Image (cartoon, grey):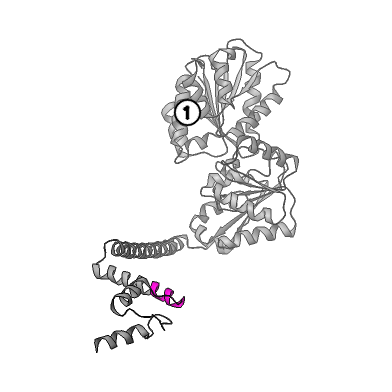
């Protein structure tokens, strides 16, 4: 049973290095079902691998299937229509789902290939690891051969292979965890986040060879940057996990055809996808790991071509700068002297203090706003309670105020109010005239004079 761990730089032809031997070993079609499975970390990479396999297998008679829509696959595998298929290209999640929901058997699988294998073992990707173990357990053939391919190697991958594989064969082309030397790499200090957008616009206005790939760290950042560039009148689009599968396919095709000049991407397009003719890659957000940096930069300078890569960094990225500097220098690119002299430990402590101050200020502001909201709510509740169940003197005051207002309105119309008219009728029995003009002014009337005369 053969186990292979292969590591080679980006753009060096890893996909062809496992597809060509695979097609040669399978030789001709069979009616026994799938004999080889190629597992890719993303849907886009799986579709690209399928296209390359179809091109290389032309004339061999081998039937290749890409597991894209689980609904179609469920119908096909439930009715055992897969007996005429030879090679499956899939993502780990879809394959595990099909194994659980259908009667698909992997008992005859002879070759299991894991492309971009280090992605399955990144920190926080335990789901991929669990899925791979389920796939590994389903392949029970005694003749199974396993191969892991990637441009970067990780300690987690080595540890997993030592636990699950016996005496694997390691093959490495060039230095491990290094960027391709075909790419001219440069680090650009932009100050802060606002400086990133300014620098990007300056680069585009100065004239660059299109198309251009721009990488961000999150899909939210990618969407925001896309909106800024779209307002500049550029032929731009955005590719991230929030787009629908049909949108992603359309965007990739349009970018390859040259209809899109600038493509803003999240980490989704950072691995494996082959964009031919890309002259410039811009890391708008600083990569969080050296592996992410190597794979992003590897989207240019592929298949012997040359390219450029610019990486923006701010003062907050300085503590992580040293690792990327080592990769850049290993590829033979120059690094400014001041970057080499940066005291990253001191910067890290300084940024930590700044971060703690911001958090304290944010906490104080939130507590102050909360206290103000609570006090305002308390005042409103107190006011409402007073209106609903206030003391009798308050209600009497409100009643007298209403009577005065009604009296004022009647006086303005030359008519006595009902209460005043009743008092006049019972006490004086004479003509009523009111000189009241507005609330608070002294009232004079014949009504009061007659009452005074009657008392005498």
Question: Dividing the picture into quarters, in which one does residue 258 lie?
Answer: top right
Give the dominant element type of the magenta stretch: helix, strand or loop.
helix
* Vertical side of 174 occupied by 357: above or below: below
| Image position, residue 117 (x, y; %) | 53, 33
Q: Mark 1 sits on what residue?
A: 132
Q: Residue furthest bottom?
A: 456
Q: Is residue 284 magenta?
A: no
Screen quadrant of the C terminus: bottom left
* Vertical side of 213 occupied by 17: above or below: above
Q: Residue furthest top?
A: 31
| Image position, residue 360 (x, y; %) | 37, 63
- Residue at screen point 55% across, 62% down: 192
- Residue at screen point 28% across, 67% down: 395
Question: Dividing the picture into quarters, in which one does residue 7 lie?
Answer: top right
Magenta extent:
405-416
Tell whether 371 sits left or right of 193.
left
Tell whether 147 sits left or right of 273.
left
| Depth order, front residue of 275/368 | 368
**Mark 1 secondary-structure assignment:** helix
| Image position, residue 59 (x, y; %) | 73, 18
């Amino acid at each position: 049973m053969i186990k292979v761990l292969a590591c080679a730089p980006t753009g060096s032809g890893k996909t062809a290095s496992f597809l060509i031997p695979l097609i040669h070993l399978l030789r001709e079609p069979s009616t026994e079902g799938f004999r080889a499975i190629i597992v890719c970390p993303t849907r886009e990479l799986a579709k690209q691998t399928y296209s390359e396999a179809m091109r290389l297998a032309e004339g061999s008679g081998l039937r290749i299937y890409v597991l894209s829509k689980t609904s179609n696959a469920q119908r096909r595998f439930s009715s055992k229509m897969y007996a005429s298929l030879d090679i499956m290209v899939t993502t780990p999640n879809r394959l595990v789902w099909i194994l659980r929901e259908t009667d698909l058997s992997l008992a005859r699988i002879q070759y299991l290939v894991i492309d971009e294998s280090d992605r399955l073992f990144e920190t926080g990707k335990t789901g991929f690891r669990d899925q791979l173990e389920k796939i590994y357990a389903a392949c029970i053939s005694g003749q199974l051969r396993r191969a892991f391919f990637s441009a970067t190697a990780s300690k987690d991958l080595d540890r997993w292979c030592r636990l699950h594989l016996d005496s694997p064969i390691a093959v490495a082309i060039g230095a491990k965890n290094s960027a391709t030397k075909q790419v001219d790499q440069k680090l650009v200090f932009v100050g802060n986040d606002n400086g990133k957008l300014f620098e990007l616009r300056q680069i585009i206005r100065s004239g660059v060879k299109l198309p251009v790939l721009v990488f961000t760290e999150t899909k939210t950042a990618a969407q925001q940057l896309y909106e800024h560039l779209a307002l500049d009148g550029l032929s731009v689009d955005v590719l991230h996990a929030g787009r629908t599968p049909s949108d992603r396919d359309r965007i990739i095709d349009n970018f390859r055809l040259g209809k899109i000049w600038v493509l803003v991407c999240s980490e989704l397009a950072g691995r494996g996808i082959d964009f031919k003719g890309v002259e410039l890659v811009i890391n708008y957000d600083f990569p969080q790991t050296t592996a992410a940096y190597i794979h992003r930069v590897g989207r240019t300078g592929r298949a012997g071509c040359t390219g450029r890569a610019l990486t923006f960094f701010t003062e907050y990225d300085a503590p992580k700068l040293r690792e990327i500097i080592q990769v850049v220098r290993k590829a033979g690119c120059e690094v400014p002297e001041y970057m080499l002299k940066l005291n990253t430990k001191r910067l890290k402590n300084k940024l930590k203090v700044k971060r703690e101050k911001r958090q304290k200020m944010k906490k104080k502001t939130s507590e102050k706003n909360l206290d103000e909201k609570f006090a305002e709510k308390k005042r409103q509740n107190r006011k409402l309670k007073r209106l609903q169940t206030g003391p009798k003197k308050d209600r009497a005051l409100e009643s007298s105020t209403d009577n005065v207002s009604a009296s004022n309105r009647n006086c303005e119309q030359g008519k006595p109010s009902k209460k005043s008219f009743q008092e006049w009728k019972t006490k004086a029995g004479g003509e009523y005239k009111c000189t009241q003009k507005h609330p608070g002014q002294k009232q004079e009337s014949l009504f009061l004079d007659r009452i005074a005369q009657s008392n005498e």
